[in-house]
Image (cartoon, helix red, strand yellow):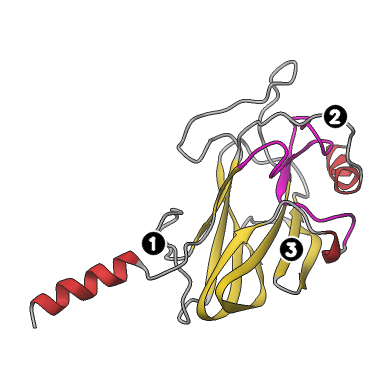
Amino acid sequence: MKHCLLLVGLVVMLAVGAPAYSQSISMDVDGNGVCDGFDVISGATTSVDVYMDTNHLLDGTVVTCPDAGSPPLDMFGYNVIVHAGGAGTITYGGWSNAIATWTALEAFRTSGSDASVGYVAPGAALAPGRYKLGTLAITASGDPTLSFLTNNSSLGGLGAPFTGFGGSCSGGGLLFVMDLGGDFIGACATTAGTDVKSTTWGTIKSLYR
């Protein structure tokens, strides 16, 4: 039933205010599973991992659903929109879902500098926690950046695509959906400039030449 409500939530925006439940979504470029100043896209970058934490702030603080009965901040579906910017270009190559058995709800789509995708669980929801949603394949040049968008109607699909996840918590704007910019604001994306780790390592090596 709630999986059907996720479909409805993609289309129908409820006319109520949306409190911040404070989940978080993040990107990782260097493969360490952490979003920080080291996550810089260069011409050598071919993929970017995306993570969703359904019950923690970016700083690790635990949060709960304020609904009556305190339902879990679990997850039975997700949708992600990314935007390419900065002083460079990114060409999208596709999306690899990282959650076993989940199936595509929104096919991978691109529109200009934006891309979106959505997946849903065929059965029980995942328990509250942090999960790798998937990996975005890219080709990059120059010094581009990637960030998350709250929505973009030009991407089409079941409704105006959004960034967020479906779960047992009712949400404040989309029915049974925690959406970025409405129910939470915690988002960590890539950083422009030179990868600090690479620069530091190059400096260290030069000292021993």
Magenta extent: 157-185
Amino acid at the residue labelled 3: Ser
Q: Which residue is mark 3?
A: 116
The structure residue drawn at horizontal position 71% and vertical position 45%, both measured from the top left corner, is: 165
Q: Position of residue 17 (x, y in %)?
A: 80, 29
On screen, residue 190 versus residue 30, left or right, reads right
On screen, residue 96 versus residue 156, left or right, reads left
Q: Which residue is mark 2?
A: 16
Amino acid at the residue labelled 1: Phe
Element marked by disc 3? strand
Precedes in sequence: disc 2 or disc 1:
2
Name which quarter of the figure residue 178 lies in: top right
Element marked by disc 1? loop
Q: Quadrant of the N terminus?
A: top right
How far apart are labels 3 and 1 at the CA level? 24 Å
Element marked by disc 2? loop
The residue lying furthest to the front in this view is 87
Precedes in sequence: disc 3 or disc 1:
1
